[in-house]
Image (cartoon, rainbow, N blue to C red):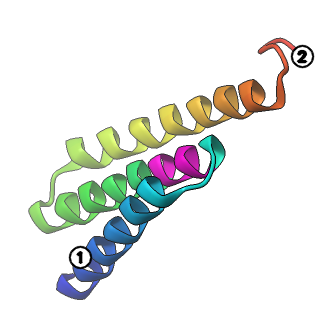
Amino acid sequence: MNIALVILIVACFLCLWKFIEGPNAMDRFLSILLLTLIAMGFLGIYSIKTHSEFLIDLTIDAIILVFVGTLAVSKFFQGKELDE
């Protein structure tokens, strides 16, 4: 478990670096998206450590919301409406 947390922390710093140095808005969006998924990884590992079913449900719900948000923002970057 501790090795997974160290890997997630390193990935978090790499995403923050990409967010700061990203040349355009799409790179910055992808780094924020990846940061939220890494946060869900932290939450998932913590829920396994504490044997909390509520945190697992919360993690699954948050991942679904991030997925829907990703679809909406990708449509925006393509210049299309949400109903297209």
Residue at 21% from the left image edge and 82% from the top image edge: 1
| Helix, strand or loop at mark 1 | helix
Residue 76 as seen in the image, left or right of residue 49: right
Q: Farthest residue to the right: give it.
A: 84
Q: Position of residue 56 (x, y in %)?
A: 30, 49
> Which SS type dominates the magenta stretch?
helix
Q: Residue under circle 2?
A: 84
Q: First in sequence: mark 1 or mark 2?
A: 1
For residue 5, the mark is: 1
Residue type at the position of mark 2 = Glu
Tell me the magenta residue range. 27-33
For residue 75, the mark is: none
Residue at 33% from the left image edge and 65% from the top image edge: 12
Picture quadrant where residue 49 is located: bottom left
Residue type at the position of mark 1 = Leu
Residue 43 as seen in the image, left or right of residue 28: left
Residue at 42% from the left image edge and 63% from the top image edge: 15
